[in-house]
Image (cartoon, grey):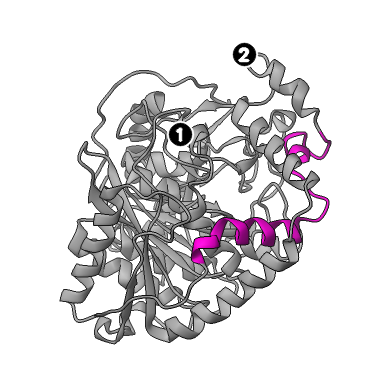
Amino acid sequence: MLSASAQKLASLIREGKLSPVDLVDLYITRIEAENPALNAVVADRFEHARREARGAADKLARNRAGEPLPPLFGVPCTVKEGIAVLGMPHTAGVFARKHLRAEQDARVVRRVREAGAVVLGVTNMPEGGLWLETDNRVYGRTNNPWDLARIPGGSSGGEAAILAAGASPFGIGSDIAGSIRIPAAMCGVFGHKPTGGLVSNQGYWPDVPGALDTFLCTGPMTRRAEDLWPLLGLMAERTLEEQPDTIDLRDVTVYPLETTGAARIRPSKRQAVRRAAAALEARGARIAELRTRGLEKALFIWTAMMEEEAGALTYGEVLGNGRPIRIARELLRAPFPSAPHTVQALLVAGIEALLKSVPAPIATWSTAGKRLREELEAELGPRGVILHPTYTRSAPRHWEPLLTPLDFVCTAVFNVLAFPVTQVPAGFDEIGLPLGVQVAGRRNADALTIAVARALEEDLGGWTKARRKTRGQSRATIAP
């Protein structure tokens, strides 16, 4: 039960072969065993979950006529803390919000709960949600379940960590530059960034204005590829017409892209792309070289298109919960335990402020990004996918991302292009850390990228429960 897909668990419950009470208790026990070392679940609702599970069991016992039950009936899950869950902390790791609790469910949470899911708790994220290291002064730092000395990625790092540890069947994350895909890759699970605008971000904090609401994507994170499509269907704002099951991989053209030149990709990550391409070719897919150029300018394109839509909103104001902070002063305070902000968040805010003060050809790069979108969509067509490393390397050690702060560029450009992208576990590197490959398609090709992910799960091995290298306690502050 600790390795089954959410779909399998729901099926067993509907058939009367598995008690929702026993299942919820099992996952609570697993969280209690794994979380002290990980600090992934930062606030739980275990007693509420147990009551909901008992209610599900009673409903199941009364359902003698065999009436249809919701698709996720009795299945436990977890949710990124920046996504509102009624009554739970909703701080996004921002110290100024540490006493705030959600007054209602986010739209996507409401949908999965209406589908019968039982939320066990909320998971950690970086301060304000814009960094690779899942750390903040509200809850502390989250560790990678494969090696506690390493990061789980961000910003949906707590979610990826608890999934990889086998302590949650599925979760809900969000992604504006790789925040679902990067932690999923570093922890060895699946994650899907939907087509921009397909899933509502209502109930996520920080709020994002204008087209940023298209660049930010709420989506599913899972251990098994078969869960991605049903969960996306529940979350989506419109009916998903094409189904992964209808896609014949012999009709698919694969464009392996080991590097764009925008960042240095480690050999193990390049090899993962080659293995994925070879596996798809063996299934009958066509392998081709991508002709469209422009992805090597991904950083400039992402930065310009984000800046164009952000308007007056600054990351410094996010850290102050709507009020600007004095970055230099806070950096001086940051080394002290009582400081409200992490060094990482302040450096990101400082870099942003510096960039805003320097004249930049935002319109030029934004236009280049829109042109790149058109050219890529034309080349990919309805059955083309790009294979690309999800990150430049396997999970770094804590603090190391400060040395390579721009490596998120592998994932970020697909947000401003609004392309759907599925992160797929792709085996392990030479020291046993998970590798990941992302599968990108043109807008509204979510079924295609998920169909490819399903095939690669069979060929590359998919999720394996994390086997920890080092043991110890995280630097954590657990919310009551």
* Residue 311 x, y percent position in the rendering: 81, 56
Magenta region's main secondary structure?
helix
* Residue 201 x, y percent position in the rendering: 64, 59
Vertical side of 15 occupied by 314: above or below: above
Question: Within the magenta stretch, is there residue 198?
Answer: no
* Residue at 67 percent of width and 26 percent of height: 341
In the displayed structure image, the side of residue 212 where residue 376 appears, left or right? left
Q: Determine which of the numbered discs, if any, sits on residue 281 in the image.
A: none
Q: How many marks?
A: 2
In the displayed structure image, the side of residue 304 where residue 17 appears, left or right? left
State which quadrant residue 208 falls in.
Answer: bottom right
* Residue at 30 percent of width and 63 percent of height: 11
Task: Tell me the magenta residue range.
Answer: 295-324
* Residue at 52 percent of width and 50 percent of height: 179
**CA distance separating discs 2 and 1:** 20 Å
- Give the secondary structure at mark 1: loop
Amino acid beneath label 2: Pro
Between circles 2 and 1, the one closer to the viewer is 2
Circle 2 is placed at which residue position? 337
Circle 1 is placed at which residue position? 40
